Amino acid sequence: MHIQKFRYELTRGLGSIILYLKETPELTYRHLDAIADACIRNTAYDPQCDGSREAYLWEVIQLSKASPILQERILDALGGEVNGWDLLQVYRLAKIFASNGNPTAVYAMKRGFRYDEEWNCFIGGEEIVEAEGAQGLLFVAKEIGKRILSSGYEGDTFIWEFAKEFLGEEKAAALLKENAKDEKIQAFYHSTVREEEARSQLNGRKALSYEELKSSIEAGVRVLHPNIRWGMRASKEDLFKAADDLLKEEHPKKLEVYLFIFAKTAFPLDSQKIIELAQSQNKRLRSAAIHTLRNLKDGRIHRLAVELIHQRETEMEALELFALNYEENDLPLLERIAFKKYNKHSFHNMELDMVNIFENHPTATCQKIMIELYHKGLCSPCRRRAVEIMLANHILPASLRDEIRYDCNPDIRDLWMKSASAGLP
């Protein structure tokens, strides 16, 4: 495999990398830099949604026949080269190294434990506790307590919640009480108590009534994304009130706020006004209207989707409207969009829309699009959905069936197990 191709497929976490390393172990020396880079730099499109890749990367490291060299390079990164998601991935790998007998891993983890400015918290504490148990918790508590005492840092409960789960709540609490004379540990413990109380108060807040929400809209408050959650939880009666007020509203900014209420909730009244808004020259208003219409099935919406997909400015947004309104003769329109060149963010948006469409409209004719998504997407959850679509329609190529067994996403590996159990070829 060419070095560039190896990097490309490793970045995506494809099972083809595992197959290649199994089949040609004598050539892996060519790819050590690519493997080290993928371990030190998290290459997931959205690490928060994508899940951790450390098990897949550990498999790659072992198959490389250069595990000691790679482990040393990766642990060296804890010295200050990485932060954020990259740092978290290195810590997770270091934890695996420690559990597999690397004598320097825990030392490197402690040496690299630090506050991350971007995340406004410490990274690696959970991994240190898991690797060293009670002694790990005491170390982490002291380091965090030191920062609490020397700055305005307030701490957080994530490490403490993990320690209670991993060590047992009684054991973890007793450990801190036994060492309460240490002012740093005491500061850590008190910060977790304050944070837990603050979260309890926040979770106890009462949701806005529709009257309160409407008043805020009338006052010109443009709170958009919380309105999506409000719409998902609202009663049928309140949704009808909001829909009726939307149809009466004429102010563009207020209309946009009302539309966000129905971004993930079906609009309960006639959608003609929203169809007209989806053709607005106001881009924000148009996008909000399209987000609302994607939840509805209607011949008028299908006609609008076909119209918008023929216009360069709206062709990508139009994909959302096919989610519930796709027809078989729309396939050439979608293929034209799928095989264009995109930056990674635009490709991911297109990918999301495509899997939404073909999950709702099963058909074997989508194979070319799904294979394109499989190979080019950086998002493994979207790749899983593409594989599910191909399996459901019996169009997964034999070459990909071999690969998914070793994908970085455990859910994709499970799909292979299920298909193998079902006797699929």
Image (tube, rainbow, N blue to C red):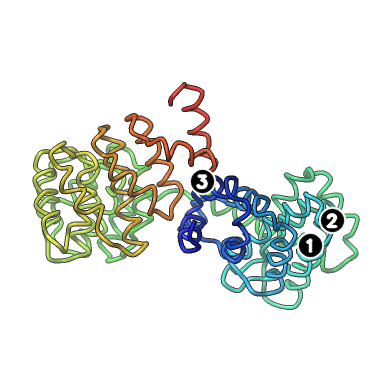
Instruction: Between label 3 and label 2, give the one nearer the viewer.
Output: 3
Which residue is pictured at 44% across the width and 46% down the height? 381
- Determine whether 182 is above or below 396 in the image: below
Most extreme residue toward the bottom, as rendered? 150
Amino acid carrying label 2: it is: Leu
Q: Nearer the viewer, residue 372 or 143?
A: 372
Query: In the rendering, at what x and y percent does residue 52 appear?
Result: 58, 51
Which residue is pictured at 36% across the width and 30% down the height? 392
User: What separation in Å lies between label 1 and label 3 (alpha carbons)?
Assistant: 39 Å
Q: Is 205 placed left or right of 67 in the picture?
A: left
Name the residue that disc number 3 marks.
Answer: 15
Any mark on residue 92, and which?
Answer: none
Query: In the rendering, at what x and y percent does residue 264 appear?
Result: 31, 45
Any mark on residue 141, and which?
Answer: 1
Task: State the SS at label 2.
Answer: helix
Any mark on residue 176, and which?
Answer: 2
Query: In the rendering, at what x and y percent does residue 324 appear?
Result: 22, 39
Q: Nearer the viewer, residue 406 or 210?
A: 406
Task: State the SS at label 3.
Answer: loop
Q: Is 29 placed left or right of 254 in the picture?
A: right
Q: Are marks 3 and 2 in contact (CB under 8 Å)?
A: no
10 Å neighbourhood of mark 3: few (<14), some, or many (≥20)?
many
Which of the image's four quarters has the C terminus? Answer: top left
- Determine whether 358 is above or below 99 in the image: above
Query: In the rendering, at what x and y percent does residue 309 appear?
Result: 14, 54
Q: Are marks 1 and 2 in contact (CB under 8 Å)?
A: yes
Task: State the SS at label 1.
Answer: helix
